[in-house]
Amino acid sequence: MLWDQYVFRRGADVEDMWDSMFRVRREAKRPVRLLYIAGRGFDMRAQGVMSKFADSLKASGCEIEKADLLLVGFKDYQLSSELQEQTEANAAALKATFRPLGEVDTLMIGTEAEGEDDISAGNALRLGTAELLGRVSDQTDIVLDVSSLPRIAYLSFMLGLLELLTDAATVSTLSAKGVNFQVLVGEDAALDSHIQSEDPSNNLVLIPGYSSALQVESMQDWPLVWFPVLGENRTAQLQKVMSVVPELAEICPVLPHPSRDLRRGDKLLLEYRSLLFDTRETPLSNVLYAHEAHPFEAYRQLLGAMTRYRQSMTVVGGCRLVVTPLASKLITLGAALACFEMKFQGARGPLDYSVAIPYAEPRRYVASPAMLQQSKPDISALVLTGEAYAY
């Protein structure tokens, strides 16, 4: 496994990790060149995450040679006036927090191209991801804060950055020439379950680079194994994705367990009973469990299942693996890491591009501003590449 050894911190341990990381940098007299990527959204959890990171960096005494904040916004979501106002206030607060460190820029992603006809959501995501990756140059540190980013966006950005920074041909691929790539999360699974995603698009969006398992003609006769990673209030999105999943597909629902809510998995089984178990007759023995609060454990569990299916189906040429992430952020990140590794392994063998991540992107979000403001998330940090993996 790529992340057989990994760096994951939660709560107060996150700031201890930053203190250690920046102290080593200061003592070695290596300046920091930072690219911080965050969402220009309504979720206020991003403010707390950035504030703690900025305070740690300033207190470290490191030389900050260059620091850039890229706020990524989205044009096409339908939000209430309250959430629109909160989006503007959140963006202003993030800019004010970062300006003592460096420059601030905004990247807007939407289906309307200047001077052209509307483009699809998938193409807009692909172009936006390509523009974001173009901002990577000589940075020593890249931080992706997913707290206020839509799921489809942070998955595209994280997987794109991992491909850019790593090299399948090298053994120490995660060292990434010393570029520290962190993913930060203000996690509150209970709040995520109350943010409703409505009116999903009829056109599925596929993560750039993770589509060929559903599109390449030579693979269409291969068996398909579908891993829907379940979360609350995502029935409409699941139905949209199910429309492209063959009737004979093997379905392996992924449920959060352990979970802060001990009955969360049972509630999700009831919520999706009709779609997955009555209509598709999915056996309960196919259910997988992924740790709600530990992305690397979720990564191990899902990667193990995907590997077993791929190995068992080599006798028929291979299989197509499809993952639909509908759960809270940390499980979603773990699922994405499993997909990255399966593609990474495929690049070294005959089953290249055998993983797809289809998603029915919602066009409207509904959330209680009061709940967003009252949320007290746990901050988590995943270090995916860099100096920690150089030895």
Image: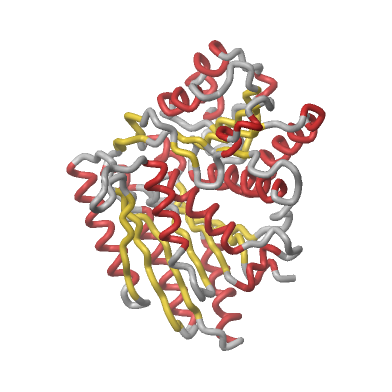
Expressed as whole percent of the image width and height from the top left, the position of residue 170 reads 73, 64
Expressed as whole percent of the image width and height from the top left, the position of residue 110 reads 31, 48
The answer to which of 165 and 2 lies nearer the viewer is 165
For the C terminus, the image quarter is: bottom right
The answer to which of 371 and 151 lies nearer the viewer is 151
Residue occupying the far left of the picture: 81
Examine the image and state in which quarter residue 195 appears.
top left
Q: Could you tell me if residue 378 is visible in this image?
A: yes
Expressed as whole percent of the image width and height from the top left, the position of residue 21 reads 58, 74
Tell me how the rendering is colored. secondary structure
Query: Is residue 66 shown above or below 251?
Result: below
Q: Could you tell me if residue 256 is visible in this image?
A: no
Query: Is residue 381 shown above or below 33?
Result: above
Q: In this view, does 175 lie to the left or right of 194?
A: right
Expressed as whole percent of the image width and height from the top left, the position of residue 382 reads 57, 58
Q: In this view, does 369 lie to the left or right of 122?
A: left
Residue occupying the far right of the picture: 315
Q: Which residue is drawn at 57% across and 81% down?
A: 25
Examine the image and state in which quarter residue 129 appears.
bottom left
Q: Which residue is drawn at 64% across and 45% down?
A: 338
Q: Residue at x 57, y 32 (%)?
A: 214
Q: Which residue is drawn at 41% across and 75% down?
A: 67
Number of numbered tags placed on the structure image: 0
The answer to which of 348 and 197 lies nearer the viewer is 348
Query: Is residue 225 shown above or below 327?
Result: above
Query: Is residue 297 shown above or below 72?
Result: above
